[in-house]
Image (spheres, rainbow, N blue to C red):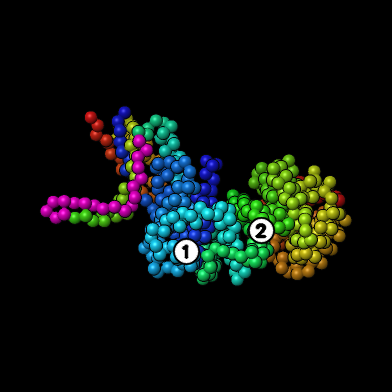
Amino acid sequence: MSSLEHLFRREAGRMVATLTRVLGVANVALAEDVVQDALCRALETWSIRGIPEDPAAWLMTTAKNRALDVLRRERTVRTFAPEVAWHIESDAALRPRLDELSAGAPIADDQLRMMFSCCNPRLTEESQIALVLNILCGFSVSEIASAFLSRDETVKKRITRAKALLAGSKRLFELTDADFAERLSSVQRALYLLFSEGFHGASTDSAVRAELCDEAMRLTALLCANTSTATPASYALGALMFLHAARLPSRVDAAGELTQLLDQDRSRWDQRLLLEGQRLLEASATGEELTAYHVEAAIASLHAAAADAASTPWVAIVSLYDVLMRVRPSPVVALNRALAIAMCHGPARGLEELRAIENRDRLSAYPFYSAALGELELRAGQTTAAYERFREALALARNPTERRFLERRLAACRPDGREAPPTK
Amino acid sequence: MAQFAFLYRGGDPMPASPAQMQQRMEKWLAWFKDLADKGHIKDRGVPLDRSGAVVTRGPKHAITDGPYAEKDLVIGLTVVEARDLAHASELSLPCPIFEQGGCVEVRPILTL
């Protein structure tokens, strides 16, 4: 049933975005209610009658009718933006107006506006991401909580507060060009974090994680398809997502175990995604600004172009990490830089770099700092030290997949371990 | 072959998330497909809204909202073909409504 894939979830996001444009941001809850009703109706009807020819249109018509009912009943007690209120006062004008409004703008445009509304600068990044996932991607509170390993309560509070802030807005969906420009970097950042959670996150469910990556890519594609948001940074963001996503099929091996980049079966990388990533990277190479997305995409593209670890241009990768440390320094970037240095100049240099990372205390809960130290010690022949490092990492593992990965690295430290460390 | 009505009764409230709703619907579609592939579907039938009225006449006329409890509510019906009541009942067993806490009432259809 591939044509139906995520139909309910995706249509929920689209419909809420469109109806919110019609009803105003203050009525986003009303939009969500009528969409929920439409989905319930669809479930009951389609279950027995089968799926109609145009399920999206069926859902939208049902939601719109439901909205009309509610508006007729409640128009006196609700607050509407002036543009809508005028039409809602006259019953005869209500339906044509609703039809006209919901047919007016392309759906992609509604979703774009919703994305920018969710990324309100007064919300934290976590709240922005939770809102995007809830409103635009149709994930429920508990689905979001389980993807981020948070508690339902926490996510629910976050979303409720964020929606209250949206509902306080008197404006219609009209974001000005200035809003778009001002919020674009928040939107890009939220999508970047959404993708990272899917790619590196702690959730054990790889299907959930792939969905997060898919959604981030879908929404980034919307940014790249709209003239006012298709900046070089948006293209670079898209490029890094596609280039990384291309490697997803090989991140776990046939037995479902985590595999390091160096050991991945590169024939399993998705060529279509790689090509699209390269195309976006080329499109991003205009203008003056060099963003962290550009640099990360460039690194990903060098990995993607190399046939194996040995032929990877590590010197170039190290210099890109140097740039990244200037543009957006972080302990995780420093860690990856140290690993690249180890590939150029040997494990001893890599270890020096790892131990010199500023703010490395911020990595203290991250299993892969200890694991990186262990990996390089192992390559330097310091098996006892490496063993201890992997044990520390194991204690920090966030899920069974990470745990099994680190157990295999531990086994490699034993004298009888089958995996001999590379000698480079 | 005789004809039977499957009356779907009751069931849990709707799942909260669109993905779960879709999952539930896909189970129903798969079940119908299976029945249809084996040639048992006479008429897919109709879903019924949960609202409605119960009308009684006689000494006391009344139209009420229906005194039925959620769990007894008929939410849809289908006409199937089976050898006998036992066979029809067996055919109903994989119906997703059981996972939703509801049941299937199997009733022989009287024909000429």
Q: Chain of mark 2?
A: A
Of callouts 1 and 2, the N-terminal one: 1
User: Of the residues shown, which amino acid type is indicated by label 2?
Assistant: Ser
Q: For numbered disc 2, what is the local secondary structure?
A: loop
Provide residue A323's location: percent of width, then percent of height: 81, 61
What label does residue A84 carry, if any? 1
**Res A154 visible:** no
The residue that appears at 82% across and 55% down in the rendered structure is A317
Q: For numbered disc 1, what is the local secondary structure?
A: helix
> What segment is highlighted magenta in the picture?
B43-61
Name the residue furthest right: A345
Name the residue furthest top: B1
Res A179 quadrant in image: bottom right
**Res A392 visible:** yes
Res B68 quadrant in image: bottom left
Question: Does residue A93 appear left or right of residue A199 in this picture?
Answer: left
Q: Chain of mark 1?
A: A
Let me know if residue B57 is in the magenta part: yes
Which residue is more in the foreground, A107 or B26? A107
Which residue is more in the foreground, A20 or A247? A20
Q: Are marks 1 and 2 on the same chain?
A: yes
Compared with A331, A234 (above or below) is above
User: Of the residues shown, which amino acid type is indicated by label 1?
Assistant: Val
Provide residue A345's location: percent of width, then percent of height: 88, 56
Q: What residue sits right under mark 2 in the picture?
A: A228
Provide residue B77's location: percent of width, then percent of height: 33, 42
Quadrant of the image containing the C terminus of chain B: top left
Alpha-carbon span between mark 1 and mark 2: 26 Å
Which residue is more in the foreground, B51 or A333? B51
Quadrant of the image containing the N terminus of chain B: top left
